[in-house]
Amino acid sequence: MIKKSMFAPWGLCCMVLMLGACSSTSSTSTSTSSTSTVPTPPAPAPLPKEQVIPNSYQLYFEWDRALLDATGEQKLKEIAATITQQHVAQPQQIMLNGHTDSSGSDEYNLRLSERRAQRVRAMLEQFGLPYQMMQIFAFGESDLAIATDDNVKEPRNRRVEIFIENKAQ
């Protein structure tokens, strides 16, 4: 009899714990389901931004020359046609950056890089691009594409870079 009285409280205790566990699970699932049914607010619409589409080209020059060879002239003609066809409907700016290699004095190279950029601008104008949309920048030997020592004739440094910036709205 004593044994029966000891098991009765334990049985009652186990039943209470089981019911408590079941009830806490359902309240947890209820709170979980209530938080998962709350709708997420929509993301704010992106602000309209000015779309900038950069394009660039490079033309290379012979040593100590500001004139393009026949291949360079043909390439520039193709570049002008591409600019006209793809970018004519959008306001744009064309930057012509003239460069030289490290052979020659700094002053001479600065003037040569400017002459190269001016020549490219004149040819682009002949091919139908407005003079007003082009800006010239002369770098001389200050911005080498290929790092070299002084007085090195590196053909890849003798160039005019053409950068086109379109502003679509």
Image (cartoon, grey):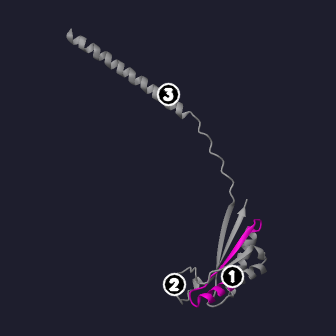
Residue visible at 43% across and 27% down?
A: 25
Magenta range is 87-115
Instruction: Estimate the spatial distance between the alpha carbons at disc 3 and disc 1, rounded to whole Å.
Output: 73 Å
Residue in the foreground of this view, choosing between 134 and 36? 134
Residues at circles 3 and 2 in contact by the CB criterion of under 8 Å: no
Question: Residue at coordinates 69% horizontally, 68% vertically from top-left?
Answer: 165
Give the distance between the C-alpha atoms of the residues marked 2 and 1, in whole angstroms: 22 Å
- Mark 3, residue position: 30
Disc ID at residue 148: 2
**Residue 22 location, quadrant:** top left
Relative to 41, is 136 on the left or the right?
right
Looking at the image, is mark 2 or mark 1 earlier in the sequence? 1
Are the two marked residues, 3 and 1, in contact with CB atoms closer than 8 angstroms? no
> Which image quarter holds the N terminus?
top left
Residue designated by label 1: 117
Q: Amino acid at mark 3?
A: Thr
Give the camera-side residue of 71 and 26.
26
